[in-house]
Image (spheres, coloured by chain):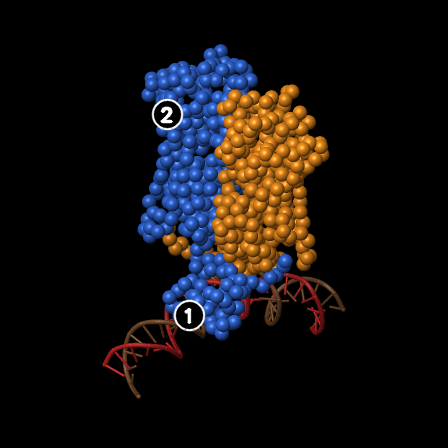
Chain colours: A orange, B blue, C brown, D red
Amino acid sequence: MKKVKRTTIYDIAEKLGITASSVSRALNNSNQVNEKTKELIIKTADELNYKRNTLASNLRKGQSKTIGVVIPRINQNFFSNVIAGIEEVTYQKGYSLIICQSDEDHDKEIQCVNTLINQHVDCIVISVSADGNDYQHLQNVLDHGIQLIQVDRVAEELETLKVINDNVQASYEAVSHLIEGGYKRIALLEGPQNLSIFKQRKEGYLKAFKAYNVPVIEELIVENAWTKELGAEGTRKLLSLPHPPDAIFASTSDFSALGVLDVANAMGIKVPSQLGICGYANESFSEITSPSITTIDQFSVYMGNTVANLFFQEIGNNDTITKPKIISIKPELIIRGSTKRNG
Amino acid sequence: MKKVKRTTIYDIAEKLGITASSVSRALNNSNQVNEKTKELIIKTADELNYKRNTLASNLRKGQSKTIGVVIPRINQNFFSNVIAGIEEVTYQKGYSLIICQSDEDHDKEIQCVNTLINQHVDCIVISVSADGNDYQHLQNVLDHGIQLIQVDRVAEELETLKVINDNVQASYEAVSHLIEGGYKRIALLEGPQNLSIFKQRKEGYLKAFKAYNVPVIEELIVENAWTKELGAEGTRKLLSLPHPPDAIFASTSDFSALGVLDVANAMGIKVPSQLGICGYANESFSEITSPSITTIDQFSVYMGNTVANLFFQEIGNNDTITKPKIISIKPELIIRGSTKRNG
DNA sequence: TTTGAAATTGCAATCGATTGCGTGAAATAT
DNA sequence: ATATTTCACGCAATCGATTGCAATTTCAAA
């Protein structure tokens, strides 16, 4: 299994009594080689089971045709969809993907980024982890001349390409929907506010209140409730208030919303009549709970596509000044059983 | 953004008036360098924001510290869990992962594998796609001296390292459970039989019938029902038989089982009293349907861990003869509402 | 002070592919 | 038949890091 000598262009050259230059040119389909020699070279390459050494090629060319992706968790629906979306596009262009997960750990994120810089990737796509708000490592990416694209969870202060959701609008629509459905006391389960996405979702929540001229009730805003467990915990607290809410917007995720639903079911509170529930992210399970959960679809695969297309568009574009470009994708409110009062 | 000259060991060497050799040695923490020079070198490297060029390093060393993974779909729970499991282990060892998805397309799978060979990865981990049963490309991996580890969906005839589930046993237990629960006419939704995993699951199904001395009813076996839609379709057919089944084992996936459940609900057939349902894979949604679905947990993350550990164990092991090693992980039957007749 | 071993450092080749430049040969034009 | 392109291919440097071997320095023992 060890030390198998792989055939190189030199082996091919030697066999045919020519130079490696010609072999290289032939295999790159250069027109500086005679058609017949080219055919011959390609044929022998095939016979010898030649595989180009991408390392050598990339080293020489100073590019890697590789894109690095850093996301908090690979096995989380939203992120694996984004990756799939990126892959769809990059694969066709002959680019490879190197995937790293930061485990929501800022230090690991820094390490991942450094590894990718070492690998000389052509672009780094990142969705920042929830802890830490020091972005020196991202600045570093730019300093190394590597394209940086932030997706979904972005460090706003950094001027880079970004592909985001219009979180404010989505939240606004979700809460408006609740208000229009007649819910009066709408609680918010919010995520870590150092992540802009969660800040924006809160902003949308507040905006809806203002638009409908409804006063905000501070005690109905629960911090840091972004897992199923924390969502459940927050819900228990909310429902034991003297004036409990009649709807809960789990702005962090459907997992959180699922926690809400569980607690409601356990306490015998009827959804949606006594309690409306709205989640975020359109996880696959949200349509099969009972009742199914109203949520927001982020078009995650499409976001991935967009990221990849943005990259190819930018490298095609030889401007020295790359203007920071932000692509905002409008999410869609998906209304389901958990908020259909008069369904 | 373009053409940023990155600092190399030569830059560091020049600045300090020494050779690149020493710089390289220092940065690799060799003890062939004076402690003080080493410190100085490391300090300057840091100041100049030096990042090793992994391409050059790997080219020289003839290894890449990279593992390639080819799976049918990134955004499918089982696979993204396997990847996460692999990543957990490889990350610690300083290895990177290159991920490709074959989209269940045999040709794309071949291309993916070739790309990875070009990249000089140290190991390829693959779960073969559902179409095609020509495995020349995998043999090719071995011929190039690259470690090959097959996971879950394996080409049995190839003698490589394998990490699999004991599908026969799992199926056997699932069907036994149904039989013991008093179900008499147990249908099987089976997957493409060119994939050994599905063959094995069928085998376990048949084995249980034999063990309990129950005759197999051919008309209750439905081919190719491995998506939610196909599962639903198969179920409609089954339930419209003169003698419909009283239980369905969706051996392909929980998605398929979900299709069964949907149809049952739509037809007003009560689960589990009139119809028992058992799925496969323990997808996250399977515990939140109503009733929750009995299924089989494959310990997917752990399978990923196992794959990675197997790799490191094998490369540590300098035997020229690497014996094909197969690690079979015993899945666990998770009994839930959909089969609890007297619950 | 001399000698020998050990510790440092430098030299130069190497990994495999790419590419600018140059040269002879063939093809075309004059 | 000669001049001028064009074509095909070779030469050699290059990308950046590593490493065997040689050269030099250091230091201690004799």
Question: How many numbered discs, if any?
Answer: 2
Residue B337: percent from the left, percent from the top? 45, 21
Point out the image quarter for the C terminus of chain A. top right
Residue A286: percent from the left, percent from the top? 56, 29
Chain-order first, disc 2 or disc 1: 1
Chain of the residue under the numbered disc 2 shown in the image = B
List the residue tagged with mark 2. Answer: B173
> What amino acid type is highlighted by mark number 1?
Lys
Residue A297: percent from the left, percent from the top? 61, 34
| Residue A184 shows in the view | yes
**Inter-mark Cα distance, 2 to 1:** 65 Å
Chain of the residue under the numbered disc 1 shown in the image = B
| Residue A92 shows in the view | no
Q: What element carries label 2?
A: helix
Looking at the rendered image, the disc whose residue lies closer to the viewer, 2 or 1, is 1
Q: What element carries label 1?
A: helix
* Of the pair A109 and B60, the residue shown nearer to us: A109
Residue A215: percent from the left, percent from the top? 67, 33
List the residue tagged with mark 1. Answer: B36
Q: In this view, does B252 lie to the left or right of A150?
A: left
